[in-house]
Image (cartoon, rainbow, N blue to C red):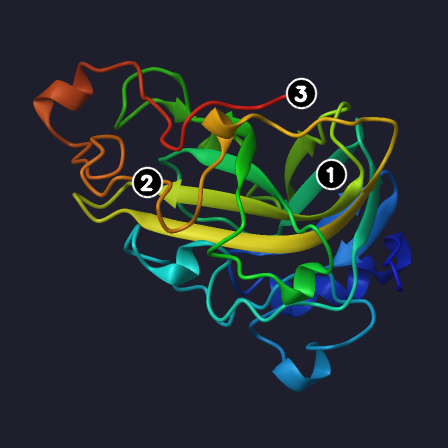
Amino acid sequence: MVSLVLAALATLLGPALAHGGLANYTVGDTWYRGYDPDETPSDQLGQPWMVQRQWASIDPIFSVDDPFIACNNPGVPPPAYIPIEAGENITAVYWYWLHPVGPMTVWLAPCNGDCAKVNVNEVEWFKIWEAGLLSGNVPEGMWWQKQFQNWDGSPDLWPATIPISLKPGLYMIRHEILSIHIENKPQFYPECAHLNVTGKGSVLPPTEYLRKFPGAYDPNDPSININIYTDQMKNTTNYTIPGGPIWDG
């Protein structure tokens, strides 16, 4: 496995700036390259450094029942894993993100073996991080999705901690941005990578934290099927993030 260190950063700036999506991951000072839909697939798929499942375009997933809501389209698995110890932070790196309204969540799923061989729609995901409306009202307030944007060319950084009590093993990590800026037309932007988690933990979450994609979301959930521009929303200062509770170990 080849991890991309800071020296490789310059090679990623060019094409990555042209789209919005999860481009890289960092653990400590080590950078790991994700898939780039602007580059030739054959130059990336199956490469020994690839840790992220393929996402072929910046187009969102529009339906909670779409099988690609799990790990984007087409979700071709990579050969490599990001090594990380339970209790460490993993940071998702975006070089550009446009939308300002909606929640962001991070999920894990144990593969119980090689993650390249699992069905992403059958594994059981659990949420380890979430952020939504931080202050103000729903249409005009400050969302974490807006706060993490940078417009000066510097990366948009999204850190999350792997629960310290998590049982070691091979996992998938799933980052999802849900954009709700268009009336009753939610846009899901998921990306998945593979992790090799080490540490002294021994725990997996109980059943009430587990979800499948599709299946985790109700299409009629008022946090998903929403028109943020109504008078009611202008007077609403709270937002319930869909997908159930966070498991932090």
For disc 1, the neighbor class at 10 Å (few under 14, some 14 to 19, many from 20) is: some
The residues bearing labels 1 and 2 have C-alpha atoms spaced at a distance of 25 Å
- Choose top left, top right, bottom left or bottom right for residue 146: top left
Q: Say which label, 1 or 2, has the lower sequence index.
A: 1
Q: Is 183 on the left-hand or right-hand side of 248?
A: left
Residue drawn at the location 38% of the way across and 50% of the way down? 188
Which of the two residues, 179 or 176, is positioned nearer the viewer here? 176
Residue drawn at the location 26% of the way across and 31% of the way down? 223
Pointer 1 residue: 90
Q: Say which label, 2 or 3, has the lower sequence index.
A: 2
Position of residue 223 relative to residue 197, above or below, is above
Q: Amino acid at mark 2?
A: Tyr
Which of the two residues, 18 or 61, is positioned nearer the viewer here? 61
Q: Amino acid at mark 1?
A: Ile
The residues bearing labels 2 and 3 have C-alpha atoms spaced at a distance of 23 Å
Which marked residue is nearer to the observer: mark 1 or mark 2?
Answer: 2
For disc 3, the neighbor class at 10 Å (few under 14, some 14 to 19, many from 20) is: some
> Horizontal and vertical percent for residue 129?
57, 28
Placement of the N terminus among the 4 image quadrants:
bottom right
Q: Is 35 on the left-hand or right-hand side of 236?
A: right
Which of the two residues, 226 or 17, is positioned nearer the viewer here? 226
Q: Number of marks in the image?
A: 3
Pointer 3 residue: 249
SS for callout 1 = strand
Q: Are the residues tagged 2 and 3 within 8 Å (C-beta)?
A: no
Which of the two residues, 169 or 139, is positioned nearer the viewer here? 169
Q: Is residue 145 visible?
A: yes
Give the numbered dot on residue 217.
Answer: 2
Q: Amino acid at mark 3?
A: Gly
SS for callout 2 = loop
